[in-house]
Image (spheres, coloured by chain):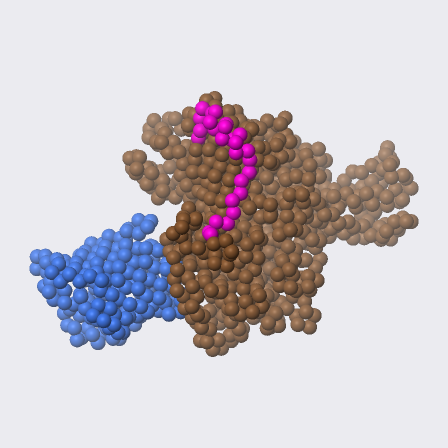
Amino acid sequence: MAPEKTSPGLVDLEKTSPEISGMGHKMKRKEDSRFTQGRGNYVDDVNLPHMVYGHMVRSPYAHARIKSINTEAAKKLPGVLAIITGEDLAKANLAWMPTLFFDKQMVLATGKVLFQAQEVAFVVAEDRYVAADAAELVEVDYEELPVLVDPHKATDPSSPILREDREEKSNHIFHWEVGDKQATDKAFTDSAVNAKVHAVFQRCHPAPLETCGCVADFNKATERLTIYLTSQAPHAHRTLFALVGGIPEQNIRVVSPDIGGGFGNKVPIYPGYVCAVVASLTLGVPVKWIETRSENLQSTGFARDYHMTAELAADKEGKIKAMRVKTLADHGAFNAAAQPTKFPAGLFSVCTGSYDYPAAFCEVDGVYTNKAPGGIAYRCSFRITEAAYLIERAVDVLALDLKMDPVELRRKNFIQPNQFPYATPLGWTYDSGDYEGALDKALKMVGYTELRKEQEEKRKKGELMGIGISSFTEAVGAGPAHTFDIAGIKMFDSAEIRIHPTGKAICRMGTKSQGQGHETTYAQIVAQELGIPAKDVIIEEGDTDTAPYGLGTYASRSTPTSGAATAMAARKIRDKARKIAAFLLEASEEDLEWEPGKFFVKGAPGKAKTIQEIAFAAYTNIPPGLEAGLEAVNYYDPPNLTFPFGTYIAVVDIDKGTGEIKVRKFVAVDDCGNVINPMIVEGQIHGGLTEGLAIAFMQQIDYDENGNVSGGTFMDYLVPTAVETPHWNTGLTCTPSPHHPFGAKGVGESPNVGSPAAFVNAVVDALSHLGVRHIDMPITPWKVWNILKEKGIAS
Amino acid sequence: MAVKIEKTFRVDEPIEKVWAFLKDPKKVGTCVPGAQITEQVDERTYKGAIKVKVGPSVTDYKGEVQIVRLDEAAHEIEILGKGQDVRGKGSASMKMTGKLQTVDGGTEVINSSELNVVGILAQMGARVITEVSNIMFEQFVNNFRKQLQSPDAAQGEMAAAKPISGVGLAFSALKASFSRHSGSEETKSDTPDSTKTTDDSGVK
């Protein structure tokens, strides 16, 4: 996995020794020794004295009025301590809570329920099983109401109005548009070709290995509330608990221990957390609440559910002139999208992709339906995945219409390396890119020319084989304070580094790893900047009492923000270290040169002080006029997003008898700028591609006409195992971000963002000679077999 | 979650005997595993209850059964059942048409049912619900046959019957109650995802 331009993925950065293991070293993950030995500490591992347990009573109906709730039988069960209903919460003004996107959401239902599995009552008992049994005994009398499932019918006069709490009696949430409509429409009128595709990015769920949960521990003596929380953003959650719950912020401590995967699912605040906090405040003992798998799939933040239409205008030679996008966004019962406040449709407007054309117009309408709330960013920066999927699908449809090779069409339209920074027609400024470089490398790795020949041969024999390309660009690292905030809090992030007298270090960040390997990569950044071996650097995140304030980890933002802050803080330390070294070496600061790990006098490499010696002096031999200690904090406000990119190619074979799709080969060439740890990057790519495979072929949170969830268990919501997962061939090119302190871009989401289009393009390519232009995900064997049957070629 | 099940089978009894039984919910109700007809509201409306145990979850439906259409001449009956779980776990409704035809030496029962389930059970999906319906149907047919042959003996047995324990649905049982008998049945099920089931696909 050696990047093309320089080994191993470092442009303009010196590679440190293996002892130091700075950036570019394939250092093994420091956290893995505890994870692989079962010594992790997850929220459900937190067990406190006198702790009791909560269990949620949930609605079986998608839309129903609550006539009464009878808790008498449940209360009589021995061991039951309390049963909280929406009416109880209403007395404390807590029946509703704000969502992260200008809406509010019921904590426990009052009046009516709006989606199946909605939270209706919270049972607290001495034991988890008693709590679950008592929940079964809570009798809720419902009156069923007409259900709205299809988002296209949301604004029909015949559809029921779901949100009676809102002043606006409509299921329409927002209309958002961006771009030059006039110029775009004109380009369409003037262009010879107009390719159009309707593509639904189905409702998916991140389904992290660990479900959501918390332990709320209110100490009546100290009046402090400690919440052990499955949180991707502990600081933001602390502030929200303070603002919504009215608890003084200094009295709240949020601790995110080890987190077993988040993928955006652990960004929102869920009713279960609030109920556990209320129960602990009331009972004065710790209250644990942990979701079951089905509760997680059915009620917590879903992703996507974008119903999109894209049009591309082009000339006959295939030069794209404009893009027009119209999208309907199904947000479920409450708009609980977790995204920056200026962007109701997230960063969906990067949908112009990797291509250079002057005009674009994009509009999005959000609506309510009787489904679980959400619209979270599943391993993506707020609707980037939907955007990348749409443009890469649309380009393939255009290639079909033009009877042009999709590679040639992409090449013809790519933004060229000398055009960066590139201003897109919808307002983004891409920092750097070399799209053709990544495409060429992927084509070579996959053997594109030979594959096309093979495909031609196979078609003659009636066999079905397809090649799908996706040359995506994504936007990560939210984000610059002038544009990005969540609930008003600017999206900077932070790092604090303390060097101990013996030259070892501890660093704390405002981000929170959920499996990304922060304990290793941040240590490597410190090693790169200060020459302290990465193994000597401890990384601590997730405790709001100790870590500097930050917005957390999602949107591939840790490296672009906290990673940058780590480098900036380290550089502050290096500046102070230079002063100390000058004092120790009796030289002037200007006469000192730095190499990773030491300062030496110019022209006299023997006259040197190591960072460890300098650290010791910072506590034992302090230069006059200088503060003792060696530490620094940085809050980094990135000047722009970073724009990773890549080309993915999928090769599929389709069984005409069963409709089964086999991914024979998959090549992923990524460019995430300078690489901190190539092994972790590769791991990220593998994980994201596997998720992309699942989305393309297996997964959907679907609802029937009554609003019943189908896809609410792992029986129906399929998770790929090693059996279904093909071998991933990965490669890198390296185009550093010009504005990031060490030229990195972030990589976690690229494979999830870029791969669905490659898979779908491959399947459509295999069937395109039969007149197939598009198939919606998940592309199951059943769907394919029906198409083959319809085309008369199923065997 | 809607499931449509069509079944046709024959029994070795004269049509009028079968018809007399089929059109009386009080009699037929006792054949439904886990079901009870508790009250007759009017000539065509009855109150009933049915308990279905699905895995760890017991659903206790209470509701009404109504004869919507009764065509004595054509031997056709249309029935609508609706019920809600007493603890609010969901509801179910069923529309069933049963038609009898004289065939060589016996009676053919043509049954068509549309079952609509809302709530926790519905999440189990069409494949489970359809199978459960098939099992309940089979049990019903056995009970029904016994009742037709020796009403009194069967009655006692029925009273001792426990709520059905399987993966099942209250009103799938009621639906099954209006088609009958085992032997050589022909089953056709249409569900939204068009899964097909056959009568021998029993749940263990």
Tell me if I can see residue A215 in this picture: yes
Tell me what hue chain B is rendered in: blue
- The chain displayed brown equals A
Give the quadrant of residue B50. bottom left
User: From what the image shows, is residue A767 above or below residue B74?
Assistant: above
Which residue is located at x 48 percent, y 46 percent?
A329
Q: Horizontally, is A532 left or right of A378 in the view?
A: right
In the depicted view, which residue is nearer to us: A4 or A287? A287
Residue A346 x/y as whole percent: 56, 44
Span of residues in magenta: A170-195
Q: Residue placed farthest to the top in the image?
A: A317
Which residue is located at x 44 percent, y 55 percent?
A161
Give the quadrant of residue A570. top right
Residue A443 x/y as whole percent: 51, 29
- Answer whether residue A48 is magenta in the image: no
Which quadrant is the N terminus of chain A positioned in? top right
- Answer whether residue A183 is magenta in the image: yes
User: From what the image shows, is residue A735 above or below residue A79?
Assistant: above
Q: Residue placed farthest to the left in the image?
A: B105
User: From what the image shows, is residue A441 above or below residue B67?
Assistant: above
User: From what the image shows, is residue B196 above or below residue A441?
Assistant: below
In the depicted view, which residue is nearer to us: A277 or A484? A484
Tell me if I can see residue A724 in this picture: no
How many numbered marks are there?
0
Which residue is located at x 72 percent, y 35 percent?
A14
Residue A297 x/y as whole percent: 47, 55
In the depicted view, which residue is nearer to us: A608 or A702? A702
Residue A596 x/y as whole percent: 76, 40
